[in-house]
Amino acid sequence: MSDKISKAAIAAGAAIGSAAIAAAVMYASKRKPKNEPQQLPPIPSGEKPETD
């Protein structure tokens, strides 16, 4: 009987471990900076900005 329990515990541990690894990989892939072009600020023209 203890053989069944230990096999079930090993299977459950493997499933939890693989799920944790998959979650870590997904999180790491989202954290990578994307190569998006950065938007440059407007070039100053020398005129005063219009404000209300």
Image (spheres, helix red, strand yellow):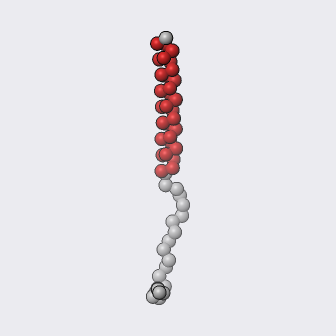
Q: Is residue 2 above or below residue 25?
A: above
Measuring from the top left, give residue 45's x and y in whole percent.
48, 85
For the point 50% across and 26% down, the residue is 12
x%, y% of residue 5? Answer: 48, 17
Q: Residue furthest front?
A: 1
Identified at 47% across, 87% down, the residue is: 52
Pick whichever, 28 or 14, lies toward us: 14
Q: Identify the residue shown where x is 51% and y is 23%.
A: 11
Q: Nearer the viewer, residue 38 or 21?
A: 21
Q: Say which residue appears at 47% left-offset and 82% top-offset.
A: 44
Q: From this view, report whether residue 52 is shown above or below residue 17.
A: below
Q: Is residue 16 above or below residue 34?
A: above
Figure disc tally: 0
- Find residue 8 and report its horizontal and vertical position in percent: 51, 20
Name of the residue lying farthest toward the bottom = 47
In this rendered view, identify the residue nearer to me: 46 or 15: 15
The extreme right residue here reads 36
Residue at far top of view: 1
Q: Position of residue 19 (x, y in %)?
A: 51, 35
